[in-house]
Structure formats: C-alpha cells, structure tokens
Image (cartoon, rainbow, N blue to C red):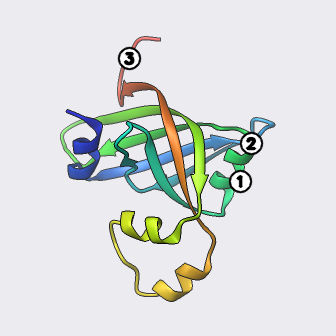
Amino acid sequence: MELKDYFENQQGLGILSTADSEGNVNSALYARPHVMQDGSLAMIMRDKLSHHNLQSNPKAAYLFVEDAPPGYKGTRLYLEKIKEEQDQERINELRRRSYQHEDELNKEAMFLVYFRILKQLPLVGAEK
C-alpha cells in the first residue's frame, strides 16, 4: 500500500522522536503525516520542543501504531527535515480536524515541516 493511501485511511497513534544538537531526545504524540505529491512528508507543528530540536538536528523518527487488533501493526519512518514554511492558509488546508478555540490556536506560531524519508521499516521486527 502506498504511504499516501495508508495515512489517509489508517487510524492509529503516531509518535515523533527528535533530538537536539547535543543528543537530548524528545518524543511527542503527532497526527498522521501528510504525504505530498513529491513523496515527502509534511507535519503541522507548533513552536514547541520537537520543532525546536529540528532547528539544530534535522533527523527524526516517526512511529505509527495502527488501531488494528490483534497484535502490533504499523510502520517506522526515519526522516530528515528538508524545509519548513509558515503559510497559515496552506496549514489550514491540510488540517484534518477543527478545534473549538480556533481563534486562540491561530495566534500560536504554526509551521508546516517537510521531511524526506530515509528508511521505512515495519513496526515490529526488521533486519539491521
């Protein structure tokens, strides 16, 4: 299955892990990424720790666990940031849901961060 179809149709839990320039790691819950036409991934980010880490270290890992019992199904993506933008109109186009306090959210700095996929592995088991 293509990643675009996978993330548009599969429900589950996503975790983005980043590290700063000194190797201090952070993991945070993140929505499913948007797969762009060129094959890159885009994630909407607020100006919090994950975004801050990507300013000094462009590498990240995204782990996605499907809502599909039994067992553990999903994917692991190893990523590298390639660019970011603050186009609020584009960010609003990509949002999958709306929020009750939309006006307050729009006051926060939002970024659309693009990643190249370096490697993809299954959630469980894989060769080195």
In the image, what residue type sits under mark 2?
Asp
Instruction: Pick out the residue farthest to the right.
Output: 22
Judging by the rendered image, the residue that carries numbered circle 3 is 126
Measured in 3D between alpha carbons, the distance from the residue under mark 1 to the one under mark 3, in whole angstroms, is: 30 Å
Judging by the rendered image, the residue that carries numbered circle 1 is 52
From the viewer's perspective, is residue 14 above or below residue 2? Answer: below
Residue at horizontal 75 percent and vertical 35 percent from the top? 23
Query: For numbered disc 1, what is the local secondary structure?
Result: helix
Q: Mark 2 or mark 1: name the one nearer the start of the chain.
A: 2
Q: Are dots 2 and 1 in contact, CB under 8 Å?
A: yes
In the image, what residue type sits under mark 3?
Ala
Residue at horizontal 41 percent and vertical 33 percent from the top? 76
Q: Is residue 83 left or right of residue 123?
A: right
Q: Mark 1 or mark 3: name the one nearer the start of the chain.
A: 1
- The location of residue 61, given as percent across then percent down, is 52, 36
Q: Mark 2 or mark 3: name the one nearer the start of the chain.
A: 2
| Between marks 1 and 3 in the image, the one whose residue lies nearer the viewer | 1
Judging by the rendered image, the residue that carries numbered circle 2 is 20
Query: For numbered disc 2, what is the local secondary structure?
Result: loop
Q: Is residue 33 left or right of residue 59?
A: left
| Between marks 2 and 3 in the image, the one whose residue lies nearer the viewer | 2
Q: Would residue 82 be visible to someone looking at this image?
A: yes
Query: For numbered disc 3, what is the local secondary structure?
Result: loop
